[in-house]
Image (spheres, coloured by chain):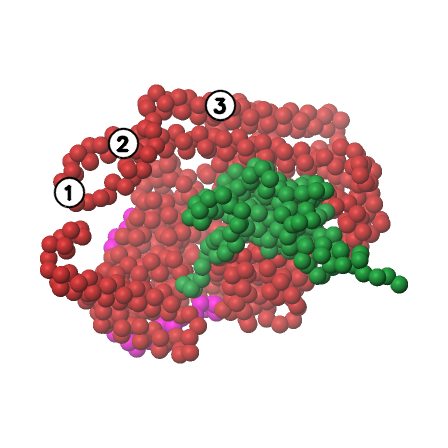
Chain colours: A green, B red
Amino acid sequence: MNTTLNLNYSVELSSYRDQHFKGSRVEQERCLRYTSTLYIGNLSFHTTEEQLYELFGRAGAIKRIIMGLDKFKKTPCGFCFVEYYTREDAEMCMRYINGTRLDDRIIRSDWDTGFIEGRQYGRGKTGGQVRDEYRTDFDSGRGGYGKIVQQKLVHAPTN
Amino acid sequence: MSRRKYDDTGDYDNRERKRRRTDAVEIEDRLESLIIRVGEKSTSSLESNLEGLASVLEADINNYRNKILKILSECAVKMPEKTTIYTTLVGLLNAKNYIFGGEFVDLMARKLKDALKSCMWKTARYVVRFFADLVNCHVISTNSLLQLYHSFLETAQEDNAPQVRSDTYIYAVLSSLPWVGRELYEKKEQDLEKLLKHIEIYVNKRSCKHVAGLRVWRSDSPHPQEEYLDCLWAQICKLRSDNWQEKHIARPYVAFDQVLCEALQHNIPVITPPPHSPDNTYPFPWVVFRLFAYTDCPEGPILPGAHSIERYLIEEHLHNIIKQFHLERKQCASFLLDFPLKQKIPLEYVIVEVVLAEMFHLPASRYLQICYGSLLIELCKLQPATMPQVLAQAVELLFERIDTMNTCCHDRFVSWFAYHLSNFQFKWSWDDWLHAAKLPVDHPRAKFVVEVLQRCMRLSYHDRIAEVVPEQFDCFVPAKPKVIFRYDPDLGGESYVWEILHATIRKMSKHVARLQKDMLDSRDSHRRRRSGAETRRASDESESNSDNSSDEDTARPRPTEEEIERMEEKLETAHTDQKNLFLIIFQRFIMLLSEHLSKCDTERRDYDTHWYRWTVGRLQQIFMQHNNQVERYGKTLNELLFTPDLDSHILDIFNQFMSLRA
């Protein structure tokens, strides 16, 4: 046994804090420590709820899944919330599913304070997630180029 | 001591005392870290590290005796892979300080007694192993170890105690012999032979009713499916015929032979196994999982044979690594691949065999299926040049042998393999399995391929899978978007049906468990509130502030006796519902199977069809997957459903299950 190892590394809180959280930092952290809801990111826009049940159900019984939607188009925009019945099951998800693949993409899970109506929508200006506005790469699973690059491409002179 | 007392004393004194106390804590922490880390990678040799540490500890024994004893005794049971390192250290300390050695032996004996009393069998087994290896370090006398062995063996003579009890005790003895066999052979050959004779008699007269239900495969070809105690016994016999020479255990004490042989030895205090009580739980027996033979591995280091003690020692070591690191899959994978003896064995093969052994373990695996699945993915990522190939070879072998695979394991195999493929772009040499498309639909191979494809589609989508599999599999890939199967439209739903059934049973079990916990908690807090009130009155004047627990209670409303009674009633109702659920399920199985058997009998047909095997397998699965819950109703099931007049084929399944705890 190596004593320098941390066997809880996977379930510790990340440094990310949702800026829209209504409450103090202390309250937010307390919520994160007791929650059984996870934010799942880097999903393909094409990934369905059924697929999510199939994968995330392997860590424990799922209470509900909330799909992240484009604010305007109301179509999936590459994230979701998975709520488990227990914290332990959510921890299993953090340990064993975080960083593995779904629809050929490495997905990321992080603790979330819990779903509140309105949070299912993308927060970018164009309706999707903010990260999809500024991206400069082409990602076929997330609608091609980032929104800003796309707009530039549209306005670029074509010969 | 309370803080207030310090306040009364002078300021200087106070600070001085605090300083001394923190110094002591610092030294204790340093000692702890030194002891725990000894044997880790270092620039100097293990022997010189041990020698140095022994001198440091010797100097501190008088001031930090209890702390040192405590750390050493914990390392002894918590780091079994470092047994010989700690026995050497204790040996060196004993040579320097005989009294300390004696205190350590007494402490370990107390640990063993407590472990036996509280059914902590793994701890008990590691203490016995530690004692055995202390004989090699001249800390413990050979005779007192033999005496301990014989007192464990006496459990074999008990009447009215389950076999799993004596199995557990005898396993503890047998599994320590690789450490001390040679020493006993050299010093006490006759006593050793007498001991082995007793064990042999025991092993031969054991009942093996439970074995059939625990086998991953019904067939013994190509690898015999051996029960764990039978297998270890065979391995020990092989070791004996090799004059107790083994090549796996590193023995640092050999270098200190001259110092150690001067030391005086202690006797282990007499330890008699506490009598069996119906509340005791013993580990389930198991069947040793064997997938590879040495011929499956490429040239290079040779895979130790199934009956070589090295195979046992390596496997145990790898299982321990998984146990220690299963919570962090990446660390777990890198520790497995960094196995100390990796040069001497085909490492990828033994790792894959051990991980699959845990995944297919019956009645249930220790951890979630996805724990093993994600571990295998990490292993492939860390060792991309070799691991994926070995894993693919394992899948081929499993597929080849799937005809006689246990239904629980078949399901786990399907579920894992689809998940694994989903992490590797569904790349697989599907063409090799084309022959399965021509088999009857309920043939295990055809079923496997269909179910894997279905699972893959659940993790992905239709077109993605249709794109990677050969056209000849079209009969297996349902047309889009409606699920239509060439042979049987109902087949597509079959694995779902079982999933739903098991999910329903699990939901019921969770409901019962929750009511039970609520009821116990309330009863507990009710009791504590009452006694807590009394203690608080009595301790008004005392300086202790240890009643944190009752502070917590005051926050919650105190449950009244009526409320607790209501909870008990609710729990009882839930138990009745659960019992009825199992009764209904088992009754349906019995009806279907009995009908099939009697029909085949009158029509003079062979009853042993694919359908029959699947149905029996599904029945077995209910027992295995929900063993903790079904166990509770064993008596009722025996009286109402699994009665002696039932066809023995069906009754056997029940008896196999009941014998798991017998």
Circle 1 chain: B
User: Separation of disc 1 and disc 2 at Cα?
Assistant: 19 Å
Q: Of residues B92 and B304, which is closer to you in this image?
A: B92
* Magenta stretch encompasses residue B267: yes
Q: Which of marks 3 and 1 is nearer the N terminus?
A: 1
Q: Give the residue type at disc 1.
A: Ser
Query: Can marks 3 and 2 be said to lie on one chain?
Result: yes
Q: Could one spot residue B423 in this view of the protein?
A: no
Residue A19 in the image: x percent, y percent? 53, 50
Rendered position, B552 above or below B249: above
* Local crowd size for mark 1, using a 10 Å CA cut-off: few (<14), some (14–19), many (≥20): few
Q: Give the residue type at disc 3.
A: Thr
* Magenta stretch encompasses residue A108: no
Which residue is drawn at the image coordinates 47% and 30% (left, top)?
A: B512
Query: Can marks 3 and 1 be said to lie on one chain?
Result: yes
Circle 2 chain: B
Please give the range of residues in magenta. Answer: B245-272
* Residue hosting label 1: B542
Q: Of residues B600 and B582, which is closer to you in this image?
A: B582
Quarter of image, res B297: bottom right
* Residue hosting label 3: B576
